[in-house]
Amino acid sequence: MLKFLKRVFLERWELVHTTTSLDQHFAMLEKLRSNGIDYKTSGLNFGGGYGGASGYSTVYHIYTRK
């Protein structure tokens, strides 16, 4: 429980990169990984058109420790 509280209240992450391109997203992750920088990712999916079949739009976020 203490570990969870510490992680929630004391750990801060800063948004460093946002893109809609999956290639750019993984290129940035590789740069961070090769430099030994801790990161976490998230994605925001805006869904498709009628029936979900046309044009999925996803935005990828990369966060690093502050």
Image (tube, rainbow, N blue to C red):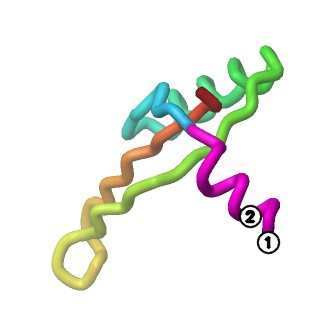
Locate residue 52, reporting x and y percent. Answer: 29, 77
Magenta-colored stretch includes residue 7: yes
Q: Mark 2: which secondary structure?
A: helix
Q: Is residue 7 above or below residue 28?
A: below
Residue sitting nearer the eye, 36 or 11: 11
63, above or below 45, in the image: above
Q: Main secondary structure of the magenta part?
A: helix
Circle 1 sits in a helix, a strand or a loop, which is it?
A: loop
Q: Give the residue drawn at x 48%, y 26%.
A: 16
Label tally: 2
Name the residue rendered at 64%, 31% in the picture.
65
**The C terminus, quarter of image:** top right
On whether residue 52 falls in the magenta region, the answer is no
**Residue 46, label in figure:** none
Left or right of residue 29: residue 38: right
Disc 1 residue type? Met
Please give the name of the residue rendered at 79% of the width and 72% of the height, measured from the top-left corner: 1
What's under tag 2, amino acid-wise? Phe
Q: Which residue is the site of mark 2?
A: 4
When asked about the image quadrant of residue 36, the answer is top right
Location of residue 6 by image quarter:
bottom right
Query: Mark 1 and mark 2 in contact (Cβ < 8 Å)?
Result: yes
The residue that label 1 is drawn on is 1
Magenta region: 2-12
Q: Position of residue 4 (x, y in %)?
A: 74, 64
Mark 2: few, some, or many residues within 10 Å (few <14, many ≥20)?
few
Q: Can you tell which quarter of the image residue 57 is in?
A: bottom left
